[in-house]
Every structure is written in C-alpha cells, then in structure tokens.
Amino acid sequence: MSPYSNPALKSAEVRLAHYSNTQFSRGRSRLTEALWLLAQWALVSSWIPGAVHRRWLLRVFGAKVGKGVQIKPGIRVKFPWRLEVGDHSWIGEDVWIDNLAPVTIASNCCISQRAYLCTGSHDWSCPTFDLIVRPIEVKRAAWIAACSTVGPGVTVGEGAVLGLGSVAARDLEPWTIYMGSPAEPVRKREIKVHVKEDLVATRSFRMPDPGQRTANGPEKLRRERLLYLCDWLPPDYGAVGQYSLQFARELAAEGRDVVLAGLSSRASSDMSEAIGQGHLRQIRLGTVAYDKTSILVRLLWTVRVNTRLIWRLRWQLCATDVVVFTGSPPYLIHWLAPLNLFLRKKLIYRITDFHPECLIAQRGSGGFVLRGIYWLTLFWRRRIDEFEALGIDQMERLAQIGISETRVRLKRDPSPVEIGPGTRSLMRPEAARGKLLLLYSGNWGVAHDYSTFVSGYLLHHRQGSARFVLWLNAVGSAVNTIADQLAHHQLPFIRGVPVPLKDLASLLVTPDAHLITLSDPFVGYVLPSKVHASIQSGLPILYVGSAFSDVHRLCTERMRAPYVRVDVGDVQKCWQAIENLARSCQEEERTYQDKSR
C-alpha cells in the first residue's frame, strides 16, 4: 500500500497543535480590537436601523467610507482599519467582511445579503496549516449577489456580477455575469441607458472620464476647489507661509479655485485674484505671536488660534474638495481629522514640522501628557489620505510610525527666490570691512544647534585666523542666547533682521559663506528650508548636523561650491572647518582678482 493512501498517516502529518500566527500583523492593538468588537456588537451588527451611525463608527476605527454608502443591520467587519468603501455603495444585511487583508470596495457597488468576503485561508500542504492572507478588490459598479462568496486574492472586475450563491475563487472579468461554484461566465452584462424620452438604447456601460465634455454639449465642468492652510503669510516672516503662497499660486494657475488661509500679525484681510485659468483667494486671520519659551502659553495660543481659524473657514471647509494643511500652526490635525469624519474631504498633510515630536525632542523625553498627545496624533495621522514629505528623512520617520509608503510622496520645497548671474548683492555691513562674512539667515530656534558653532567660532578667533565675522540675520528663540554668548566672549558679530522677500536673493549672495545647523534629535522632524536657497546662491556652506538629515543629502548632491559637514559636539572639527572655509574663500577671492586684471 502506498504511504500516501494511508488515512492514519495523513492525519498524523497535520499537527494543528503547532499552528502559530505570530507573524501575522493585526494592524492595531488588542485594546483597539476589543473596543471595535464591543462597538460592532452594540451598534454595527445590531438590528438598529440606519446607516449614519454605522458609517461613523467604521470611520472612527479607521475605515475609509465614502459618501452615500448604505450599510444594513447585521454586517460584520473583522478589521475596519483594512476596509475601504467608495461612494454610494450598498452593503446588505448579514454581510461578513472577513478582512484579515485589505478589502477595497469601489463606488456604486452592491454587496447583497449574507455575502461572504474572505481574505484568509490556510496552506493545506503545510503540517502546521499556516495562515495565508490575500486582499480582495471589488471594482466599480460590481454586484456580489446574496449568499455568494469571494475568496482570497480575488479581483472582481468593473461591472462584474457574481450570481446568487456562487463562489469566486479567481478573478472575475469586467462586465461579465458569473454563476456557480466555482463561478463560471455565463454572458456579458449590459446596462440600459435612456438617451431620449420614451426611447431606450442598449450599450455597454462606461463612466465618462473627469474633465471630458458630455455627449449632450459643451457643458462646463466645475473646477476643483482646494483649501490650503498654513501659519504666517507674507509679509510676515515665515518659510512655511512663503512656500504655501508659492504653491497656492501654482495650483491656481493649473485651473483650480484655491483658498489660501493663514495668520497675520496685522489686521485680518480677505483678497482675491485670477491666476491663469484658476482663482486664488487669500484669507489672513489677524493674531499676535506667542512666547515660545513657555509651553503653557504655546498650548493656549495653539488652541485659541486653531479654533478661530477653523471657525473662520467653516464655509470653505464645507465647500472645498481637497484640504491641504501644513505642520503649522501646530496640532491642526486634531481639529481637521475629527471634522473630516463628517465632512469626508480629501486631506493632504504637508508635514513641514512634526508635532509633538519636536517638543519631545526639545525636552529630551515626553511626560504622560505629551505621550498621550503623541499617541492621539498617530491615531489621526492614520486617517490622512496623503502626506507630502519635504525630504527622504521625513519619509523614513513616517514609515517608522506605520504610514504606508503608498500614502507618502516626496515634494521638496524649492528655493523661495530665483538667484542667477544677474542677482545683485546688498551692501556689505561696514563692520565686515576687510573680513569674510559667514551668514546665518532665517530661524535659529530650539531645533538648531548653536553650542558647537559658538565654541568653534571662539577657537577661530582665539587661536585661528579670525577671518570670519558672523552675520546673525535671524529670528528665533535661540538668537538672543547666541548674541549674549558672543558678546560675553567678545566675539565679533553683526546683528541684523530678516529682509523682505524681494531682497532675499540679494541678501543670500552678499556673504562669503552660509551657516546651517540642526540638532540631532530633530533629524527627520525638521528640515531647515534655507538649505535650498543657500545651495542656489552658489556660495560655500558650513553645516553643523547629522549626515542622516536631508540637509547633508541635498548639499552632497547639488553643491558645486565647497561644502563642509561637522557633527554636533565636534568643536575641534568645527574650528578646522571654519579655518578651511576661510582659506577657500580667500583663494577664490584671489582667483577672481587675478581674472579681473
């Protein structure tokens, strides 16, 4: 007798006691899963009529549920955070969505009573009966009839029909009707379309592409409406606001109706202009700056300003199609993401700053309150449709907190100004006569190291060539401390203020070199925007910071002028780097003078 025909031997080879699914990721904590099971039992699977509360609960637990979705009583969903349902789809009574892997149901689909969507199976050839999971996708206008089953890994094509009690174990072709177990095609599906009164024509159904004119004439389609939120808009100083205005103009020029909303240290204002084929409206909310040294003041300011901003834009939020918001003002996600459970807009998070990670990095650790805010922030981030990252280091940070790379795209800031051969420099400060100018421009705050540079700069003047003078043309919480330390050591520096945007290009070509700094705990959370314009200036750059930051990546890839990086805390190397830059600048100056003769 063959060993494979012995039933006793066959059963002995399957050892279910050794089964383990420890490699399977459930996607959420056991606590979240337990809360979902309770909510599902009490409200979703119950026979309480209505779809509103079911849609809301599914969204709260991470599902993406479109507009007008009808959900009947008795439905069961294994993991709502792995479910996506498009607009105006129907899910009937007692449907079981067993989504160990993602289940995607497109718009205008019908999942009828007692249908079973199963994403899980087992490896029957393995003695331990290992778990196998594969996603299911039901494409637009498909119908899964009552008591039918869709197996793991199956794609139900656009407009396909799976008949009553049928079983789909393989993909279903578009606009085809299937019956049986296993399901087999029986005929093509056709949709009757009324083209004139009392006249019915029959054709295969296809939705027109967005932007196409209708067959009935040149009907003009509505332009996409976009709301863009940031903090301080020009003429107030702020890199985020400057870039936001630049991006908003580009989006309007592409044919969108854009509303750009931000803050102003002056009076509130509202102005509009036509740009290309689109329209740009700028709304500024008048408010005052806050004391960044006090956490309590920062918190109160954030709550007040975010609430005022959302209230001011309440009608725009209802009318828009897409909401783009930045990391500034801080924590705006805690206002927008909960509101979007009801508004159902596309949310794009241009994550210019990570909050509260920056505050945790500043403090060195997070207490109970900060940790609570952090976990709540992660909860809302998982409900954002799309992220725009400023650098690869930010993309890596997002991946570390479980944000899928399919939801993240790299969109770097450009230089806020154009710098070319014809850009004229400003008049150099009188105090720099006969010296080389090292410019620090922009923000010098808690995210930017200064102790390494100040110590290296001290050695440059005490034991080195003393050729450089620091041009401190900056704002930020660290500026006064830096100025006090330089004055205490009697080191030369020139204190300036940020120039208007129209003069920024001229400022950036005036010094002999640029200084950029970044503290290690902020790598991937903050990307100094000045790096782009500093590189475009064509002047040498001294960077005090980590090699893992995109500052180093950009300078390495794009710099033509001399570039030196120094680790935070390496004072001796910082001193040597300043000396090397001084020699390089002097040699460049001599070369230029020789060519001019």
Image: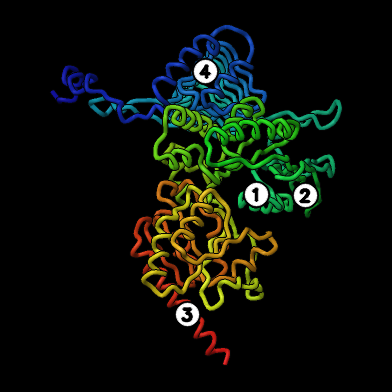
Spatial CA span between label 1 and label 4: 51 Å
Asked where in the image residue 128 lies, by quadrant, the reply is top left
Q: Nearer the viewer, mark 2 or mark 3?
A: 3
Q: Is residue 209 visible?
A: no
User: Residue most toward the bottom?
Assistant: 597
Q: Nearer the viewer, mark 2 or mark 4?
A: 2
Name the side, left or right, on which 464 lies relative to 387: left
User: Residue most toward the right?
Assistant: 197
Residue bearing mark 2:
278
Q: Between 9 and 457, which is closer to the camera in this rendering?
A: 457
Q: Which labelled disc corresponds to residue 241?
A: 1
Q: Which badge, 2 or 4, comes first in the chain's sequence?
A: 4
Residue 410 image offset from top left, x and y in percent: 53, 50
Residue 514 image offset from top left, x and y in percent: 51, 66
Q: Which badge, 2 or 3, comes first in the chain's sequence?
A: 2
Q: Which badge, 1 or 4, comes first in the chain's sequence?
A: 4
Kindly identify the amino acid type of the residue bearing the numbered disc 3: Gln
Kindly identify the amino acid type of the residue bearing the numbered disc 1: Gly
Residue 595 image offset from top left, x and y in percent: 55, 89
Residue bearing mark 3:
586
User: Residue most toward the left?
Assistant: 1
Could you tell me if the residues under marks 1 and 4 are in contact, i.e. CB atoms within 8 Å? no
Q: Which badge, 2 or 1, comes first in the chain's sequence?
A: 1
Q: Point out the image quarter for the N terminus.
A: top left
Residue bearing mark 4:
115
